[in-house]
Image (cartoon, rainbow, N blue to C red):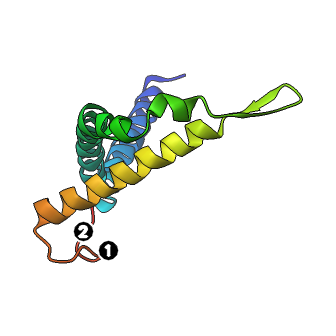
């Protein structure tokens, strides 16, 4: 190969790389990827906070009424196969509590008199 051909191929590769970088920047801006990423980070922090509230405050209150260990031990066995419906009940209770706390969090933080799909900001 001759030197000019090598230079032309190198220049073409650099232009292609620059074009791809520009396309990637456009993608980041058009789809608001950084905003979505920030929402995911904040969402994981809120999840940790809600889990701490559930595990530290609400679950002990529920245990006063009904021991959660009793729920985890509930199962039905058929031909040696164990269906642990107590775990599903426990997870459902936790989901309802977390959803309620999230609802209250949005209502208090956003200071909305009524929480609707239009009142929650979109990313």
Q: Which residue is mark 2?
A: 120
Q: Are marks 2 and 1 in contact (CB under 8 Å)?
A: yes
**Horizontal side of residue 113 vs 97, given as left or right:** left
User: Looking at the image, which residue is at 25% across and 48% down?
Assistant: 34
- Residue 86 falls in image quadrant: top right
The picture places residue 87, in percent across and down from the top left corner, at: 57, 36
User: Looking at the image, which residue is at 31% across and 61% down?
Assistant: 30
**Horizontal side of residue 39 vs 7, given as left or right:** left
Disc assigned to residue 23: none
Q: Is residue 49 visible?
A: yes
Residue closest to the eye, 68 or 111: 68
Circle 1 packing at 10 Å, graded few (<14), some (14-19), many (20+), is few
**Quadrant location of the N terminus in the rendered image:** top right
Q: Which residue is mark 1?
A: 117
- Residue 14 falls in image quadrant: top left
**Above or below: residue 42 compared with residue 70:** below
**Above or below: residue 97 compared with residue 3:** below
User: Looking at the image, which residue is at 24% across and 68% down?
Assistant: 120
Q: Is residue 29 visible?
A: no
The picture places residue 89, in percent across and down from the top left corner, at: 55, 45
Distance from disc 2 to disc 1, alpha carbons, whole Å, reads 6 Å
Residue closest to the eye, 56 or 61: 61
- Residue 49 falls in image quadrant: top left
């Amino acid at each position: 190969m001759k030197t000019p051909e090598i230079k032309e191929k190198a220049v073409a590769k650099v232009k292609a790389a620059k074009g791809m970088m520009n396309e990637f920047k456009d993608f980041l801006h058009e789809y608001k990827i950084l905003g979505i990423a920030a929402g995911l980070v904040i969402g994981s922090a809120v999840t940790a906070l809600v889990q701490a509230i559930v595990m530290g405050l609400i679950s002990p209150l529920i245990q006063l009424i009904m021991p959660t260990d009793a729920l985890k031990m509930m199962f039905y066995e058929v031909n040696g196969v164990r269906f642990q419906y107590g775990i599903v009940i426990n997870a459902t209770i936790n989901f309802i509590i977390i959803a309620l706390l999230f609802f209250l969090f949005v209502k208090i933080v956003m200071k909305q008199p009524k929480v609707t799909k239009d009142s929650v900001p979109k990313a």
